[in-house]
Amino acid sequence: MAEVALDGIRTYYEIAGDGPPLLMFAPGGFDGTVEKWRTASVYQRTRILDHLAQHFRCILFDRRECGRSGGRIEPLTWASYAAQGKLLLEHLGIERAHLMGGCMGCSPILAFSKNYPTSVSSMVLYWPVGGAKYRMRGRARFAEHLELVRRAGLEGAVSHALKEGKPFSADGKAGPWASVIQRDAAFAAGYVRTDKEKYLQIVEASANALFDRDTSPGAEPEDLLKLDIPALIVPGRDEAHATSAARYLEECLPKAQYWDALPEAQTEASAPPRVVDFLQQIS
């Protein structure tokens, strides 16, 4: 367990296991923390982290604005999430690594692979987010926060975040900086001094950047089609992880392998070996 400042933003990270480096972008939506690899849905059921750590140096971190990591009031984009991971690799002295994302953690991997392709050995995209319902729910969450700020100001947003104590994924009104406000009094004090109109523009820009399509976001299809990076795609099948989003990535990534297994078939006996075998083939 450790912390490091990356581009001025506190980042909490852990390392599990030994072997070829595997940088893991957490599931959990806007609560993308290390713990989600152990406690969230399919990742808990399959114990995938325990199995991966037997073969790889798993590098886990709390996404910026999540958990124990810090944040900054600026437009949030898939590229800014990807940059945090790239800077963490540089901090650890790693030039090239496998990447694995779960849920919303898949989209930063697409941006990472577009922006830093020579640093990527392969991609594992596990339950990539996407679909019309995912886009609509995401934009509705930002709209809830915007309505609160317009009505009660930034002081009202801080008061709400501190009173409810929930991350943005669980409480749309709290806003994307809720977790940082709850953990960092100095950040909260600076947050309320932000110009309200500028802040509203930043939130709207973030919503537009993150939820701009009815399929898997993260990079343009024209950029994905150019990637010469092996990828394993494991589909989800619910309102946040539409199977169509996984199929879209299969279509756009030239070196994609698609594991055609429904979520109920993704068990501890089947899922970890499938992922490990793919990564070991590349290694």
Image: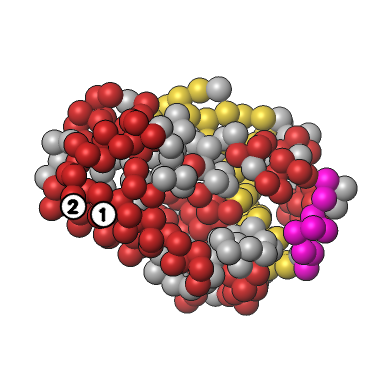
Which amino acid type corresponds to the residue marked 2 in the rendered image? Answer: Arg
Q: What numbered label is drawn on residue 162?
A: none
Can you give x and y, in whole percent of width and height, for residue 68 in the image?
45, 29
Circle 1 crowding by C-alpha within 10 Å: few under 14, some 14–19, many from 20: many
Q: Residue at point 51% right, 68% down? A: 133
**Can you say whether 254 is above or below 161 in the image?**
below
Q: What's the magenta bit mostly, secondary-structure-wise?
A: loop
Q: Residue 47 at what x, y percent from top left?
A: 76, 39
Is any part of residue 125 visible from this angle? yes
Residue stretch rendered in magenta on the structure: 260-268
Label annotation for residue 146:
1
Q: Return the x and y of residue 261 as percentages of the image width and height.
A: 79, 64
Give the spatial CA distance, label 2 vs label 1.
6 Å
In front of the other: 55 or 153: 153
| Magenta region includes residue 87 | no
225 versus 169 height, above or below: below
Residue highlighted by disc 2: 150
Query: Is there CB contact under 8 Å for labels 2 and 1?
Result: yes
Q: Amino acid at mark 1?
A: Leu
